[in-house]
Image (spheres, grey):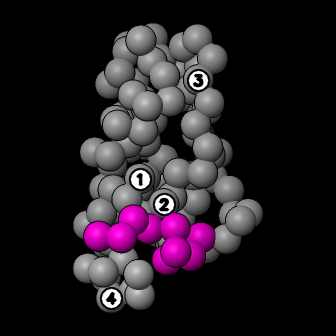
Amino acid sequence: MINTETVLKALEDVVDPELGYSVVELGLIYRVKVEGKRVEIDFTLTSFGCPLADLLTADIEAAVRSLHPAAEPVTTLVWDPPWGPERMNEEARLDLGYPV
């Protein structure tokens, strides 16, 4: 069964290739809503000009589909609130040189 927890667990495998951390660890996932086979995900990027938007969108959608072949991922790239390093988990902040 697909639920918020299983979606977030699957998204832990979606890694930002520039930073080497998952979209979950980086705090890029803002909202997950599951209604039957429809899975809505609001996410952001670390910067407005990030060239990885299409790649991360495809990877997020593939991660959702890996949970069930009938899953229907709906991704929305959002910019509000703006992403900041405080959204990262502690390990990522420390490793990337941000204060904890």
Outermost residue, front direction?
100
Which residue sits at x=32%, y=25%?
Answer: 66
Q: Which residues are magenta?
A: 83-91
Q: Earlier in the sequence, mark 3 or mark 4?
A: 3
Q: Position of residue 36 (x, y in %)?
A: 58, 11
Q: Earlier in the sequence, mark 3 or mark 1?
A: 1
Label of residue 97 in the image: 4
Above or below — where is 83 with respect to 65?
below
Q: Residues within 10 Å of mark 4 (few under 14, many from 20)?
A: few
Q: Residue 36 magenta-drawn? A: no
Q: Could you tell me if residue 28 is visible in this image?
A: yes
Q: Are marks 2 and 1 in contact (CB under 8 Å)?
A: yes
60 vs 29, nearest the viewer: 29
Q: Secondary structure at mark 4?
A: loop
In whole angstroms, how far apart are the C-alphas of marks 2 and 4? 16 Å
Q: Earlier in the sequence, mark 3 or mark 2?
A: 2
Residue matched to label 2: 27
Which residue sits at x=34%, y=37%?
Answer: 9
Q: Earlier in the sequence, mark 2 or mark 4?
A: 2
Q: Are marks 2 and 4 in contact (CB under 8 Å)?
A: no
Residue matched to label 3: 34
Which residue sits at x=43%, y=31%?
Answer: 5
Q: Earlier in the sequence, mark 4 or mark 1?
A: 1
Hey, what amino acid is under mark 2?
A: Gly
Residue matched to label 1: 24
Hey, what amino acid is under mark 3?
A: Val
Q: Position of residue 49 (x, y in %)?
A: 57, 76
